[in-house]
Image (cartoon, rainbow, N blue to C red):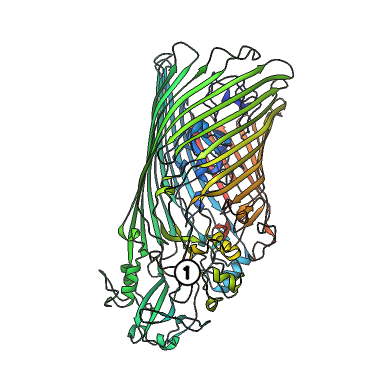
Amino acid sequence: MGLAGTAMAQDAAKSESDAATNLDAITVTGSRIKSQTFTASSPVTEITAEEFTQVGATKVEDLVNQFPQVDLSFDNFANNGSYGHATISMRGLGPERTLTLVNGRRLPASRNEIADPSIIPVAAIKRVDILSGGASAVYGADAVAGVVNFVLDDKFEGVSLNLGYSAFQHNNDDKTVQQLNKDRGFPYPTGNSGLDGTSHSAELVLGSSFADNKGHAMGWLTWRENEALYQAERDYSACSVSATSAACGGSGTANPGRFTVNQYANGGVVNWPTGKNANYVWNGKNYQNGTYLYNYAPINFYQRPDNRVTAGFMASYDINDYATPYVEAMFLERRSSTQIAESGAFGVPIVVDCNNPLIGTMCADAGVATSQAQVTLWKRNVEGGPRISSSDDSTYRITAGMRGGLFGSSWTYDASATFGRTKTIDIGKNDFLNTNIAAAALGCTDPVYGTFPGCSLYDIWTDKISKEAADAMAGTSFSIYKTSYSSLSAVADGFLGWGFPTAGGEEIGLAVGAERRHYTYTSDYDGDSAAGNFAGAGAASLPVDAGNTVNDFFFEAALPVYVGDGLFNRFDVSLGYRYSDDETSGNYDTYKLGLSSALWDSKLLLRGGYNRAVRAPSLNDLYYSQRIALDGEEDLCAGPKPAYTAAQCERAGVPTSAYGNVPVNPAEQYFGLVGGNPNLAPEIADTYTVGFAVEPLENLNISLDWYDIKIEGAIAGIGHETIQRLCLENGLYCDRIKRDARAGNYDLWIGQASDPKSGYVINLPDNIGVYKRSGLDLATSYSFQFGPGRLSASLVANYVLKQFTQSLASEPSTAFECKGLINNDCGNSPKWRHIASANYAWDRYTVGMRWRHIGGTSYKDVNGNKLSSNIWLGSGVSTYNYLDLNASMSIGPALISLGVNNVFDKEPPFVGSASFAANANAVGGYDQAGRYIFGSFSLKF
């Protein structure tokens, strides 16, 4: 298991976990200076290649995101709202503030302008380094929370072939949730699920030296196929359960349809008396007050399917001591998809004459006193099937460079060019077009709403709808995203030829260099997507075509101040500075200071560091067009009994006459005005680390490090709900709340995002936020001979001291602390997480176990008051402990590995349809689907 910094991170190897650093001259993640003696001042947690096999990881995030320094996030168990690929985020600060590297170089950005680690082959990993704290002085912008560096085995020799299989298994025996489904008449699974959500993989790695060991080349080819798992296949996800009542809930866009009826005259809605119920459904004879809820859960993917192929190679050739050309190439092809519940008429308003025979007695049944009515349509397209979005991703990154010695001195150089590109084609099917809904509902002949090719009557009025009519109303969307990344980099490092007289002859090390990085981002959409015409899209998709260039100049210095014998062995200082000329964000500086001291015959290392880091705004942060989109989860003045008074809600745009009658969206989705801001500046972060690493006994390593991160000018909107609170409680920002008064509802969600008169909250980004994160990282490892074999044990843990956010720096009332809490503001924020493991190896056999621990969280608000609106949480989420077992046996060149994760088949924390439920009534980051059973067969020769 990984260890966060050994006592002498660049000294001679002292244990198995140090072996990766025992080289002639190495660069530890977080520095560009190569040295065999200089002590590290930054804590680095290392994950070994063997650990991926021990846990059955076929994707890099399967293991990396379990580590306590990294946020719990597993992409395949995100469906509606997924990034579309894996992400790596540290300290709860988002993947955009964690820099992901391969061999110390950046990956190209995905369609979300976030690094996609899917391109990294598990089979070729040598180790993974997780660096805590900012590192922008070394790597440039975005290394705010930390750095995750995947180091590939560029010296691999031989042939390795691995075939893997994995699947989930769960006992569906949750009687409480099963009863909720039974009460509603919904189907649900029972008993043993069998093996489902299966995954198959094959990996081939080849490597060899050539030309009398002057050259070396290695390459890989991997394939992985992951099958879908549906929410219908687990009892606790078979229906969308209300967070506030013991019942299966769902969406108000249901089957059969419902109608919101308003009087209409003189070109506008005529308000009815306060409290009048305007929802109607067809009962087979006429229209009556009522509504339905639709269970959208079963048809949704729980685990998203994907199929991916990666390939790549690395090669180098030593021409002489001064010139070693090298090349690295990586490729990814991935096909994946999301599937969500059917489309429909999500609140489509049409104006219809009351004598229109299609609507029969609706006006009379609803008591409409005008000759026309505005009827808003709500109907789920169960006739047409689910909405499916299929993505095809292509990514490549190529680096070519030259390295070698300089003029026979101790100095070396490394000059390289890197180019990377991603392309994603996203095809969406089975989503209704809003313009088609109105036309078909009025029989394709209405002079106002017109018709379209293939149109036939969509008889929503009496619920007699043919599949052909429904299919004709759907459209096919496409989205094309392209990003590119190129860099030219040159760095020279070596020793100055002199040092401090107290340094025992060790010289000062220096690295100087320059880097030019260029980014581009383009997106393009079909006309209906760009117009916001797809009923289920939630917003218009608007194109972006932008680029940016950054020129950096940097240096680092490693200063051995004292080297001696006895109790006090050495004291080192490291310095770093980077000047950045950013085409869009102007000029900015980043810098670092590190201190380290070795004591007790180099068995104890004290270390500390300070880094000034930045995150530059992304191209979408700057240039995405502003538009109305789904943005919030709550209208604080909606419902029959709002938590705020009529006078307060009047500030937020609700007249006293409408108080208590503003409709609640049962799907908890509300509109906001969002988009880019070309005036954004980089975020500024100060990060500190202080700690120690000690080896009190041979092969026993212990490290403890404190980190503190403060980001000012964080790029964010104030927040949909925060703006409402500031208005309701303090009278601030009320002009940002734009309610739709046309139907007398004064809502923030009814209607279409493409309609500028829909209700919304203005929530555009600015440099307004403050984030503070601090905590402790603990790591221990110990190995020793025991009986016929060797026992190895390790622990990696994190304790959160502060998880503070202030949404608006100028308003102290927007500040909140999240450690140890679960609520709408914080999500789920446990204070303590750890992974403990033990492995025993003898002869041809190895057995191991892991204990994964996620601390409990309290269901309280940010002021410490107990919450009760979510009936499933009680006092909060209890402590979760997972037991994982694995075993392997070698037979000649073959290795057979087997294992079970989540041995006791624990279900994820059940919270219903709360805002902090990531997918299927459950909190994200926990094991979602039950036991994970895996096996692999490997040949190495």
Residue 297 appearing in the image = no
Between 681 and 416, the one lying in front of the other is: 681
Secondary structure beneath label 1: loop
The residue sitting at 52% across, 75% down in the picture is 655
Name the residue at the left extreme: 453
Between 194 and 71, the one lying in front of the other is: 71
Residue 499 lies left or right of residue 362; in this view the side is right
Q: Compared with residue 551, is residue 441 higher up or lower down, i.e. above or below?
A: below
Q: Compared with residue 736, is residue 29 higher up or lower down, i.e. above or below?
A: above
Residue 616 lies left or right of residue 531; in this view the side is right
Where does the image place residue 835, in percent across and percent down from the top left?
64, 42
Q: Compared with residue 479, is residue 397 higher up or lower down, i.e. above or below?
A: above
- Res. 558 image quadrant: top right
- Res. 909 image quadrant: bottom right
Q: Dot 1: few (<14), some (14–19), or many (≥20) neighbours within 10 Å?
A: many
Where does the image place residue 617, in percent across and percent down from the top left?
46, 44
Residue type at mark 1? Answer: Arg
Between 607 and 214, the one lying in front of the other is: 607
Instruction: State which quarter of the image contains the N terminus.
Output: top right
Where does the image place residue 935, in percent across and percent down from the top left?
54, 42
Residue 642 appearing in the image = yes
State the count of labels.
1
Between 624 and 250, the one lying in front of the other is: 624
The residue sitting at 36% across, 58% down in the picture is 428
Where does the image place residue 402, in percent across and percent down from the top left?
40, 22
Residue linked to disc 1: 739
